[in-house]
Amino acid sequence: MKDDESINRVCSNWKKFLALTDLLEYSLNELADWLPRKKFSSFTGNEMTILIKAMFQDSPMRQGLLASVLEMSS
């Protein structure tokens, strides 16, 4: 915990970077599971939308996840 605080003082986006490294490894199902738990709260709704569109092909599941992101960010 103390190391995290030290890193955050030097790099204010460290939490966001760690969330991004996780996000890049997740499947669409895993991402849908983690989204309500606010694991990606350091990203804006627009950033999450762009990342999801870039990472996953259009599908009903992706559309549902994008709708959830929009709902959570409003």
Image: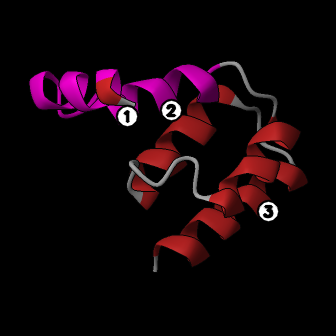
Q: Residue at x 73, y 49 (%)?
A: 34
Amino acid under disc 2: Ala
Q: Residue at x 41, y 46 (%)?
A: 47
Residue 56 located left or right of residue 18: right
Question: Could you tell which of marks 3 and 2 lies nearer the N-terminus?
Answer: 2
Q: Is residue 68 above or below residue 33?
A: below
Q: Residue at x 53, y 19 (%)?
A: 21
- Label 1 neighbour load within 10 Å: few <14, some 14-19, many 20+: some
Question: Outermost residue, front direction?
Answer: 2
Q: Is residue 56 above or below residue 65?
A: above
Residue 5 located left or right of residue 1: left
Q: Are marks 3 and 2 in contact (CB under 8 Å)?
A: no
Gap between marks 3 and 2, in whole Å?
21 Å
Residue 23 x, y percent position in the rendering: 61, 30
- Label 3 neighbour load within 10 Å: few <14, some 14-19, many 20+: few
Residue 17 located left or right of residue 72: left
Q: Is residue 17 magenta?
A: yes
User: Can you identify the residue that label 3 sits on?
Assistant: 64
Q: How many labels, in total?
A: 3
Gap between marks 1 and 2, in whole Å?
6 Å
Q: Is residue 30 magenta?
A: no
Q: Is residue 53 above or below residue 46?
A: above
User: Can you identify the residue that label 1 sits on?
Assistant: 15
Q: Are marks 1 and 2 in contact (CB under 8 Å)?
A: yes
Boundaries of the magenta span: 3-24
Residue 74 located left or right of residue 6: right
Residue 59 x, y percent position in the rendering: 85, 46
Q: Main secondary structure of the magenta part?
A: helix
Residue 29 x, y percent position in the rendering: 87, 41
Label annotation for residue 19 = 2
Label annotation for residue 32 = none
Query: Quadrant of the image for the N terminus?
Result: top left
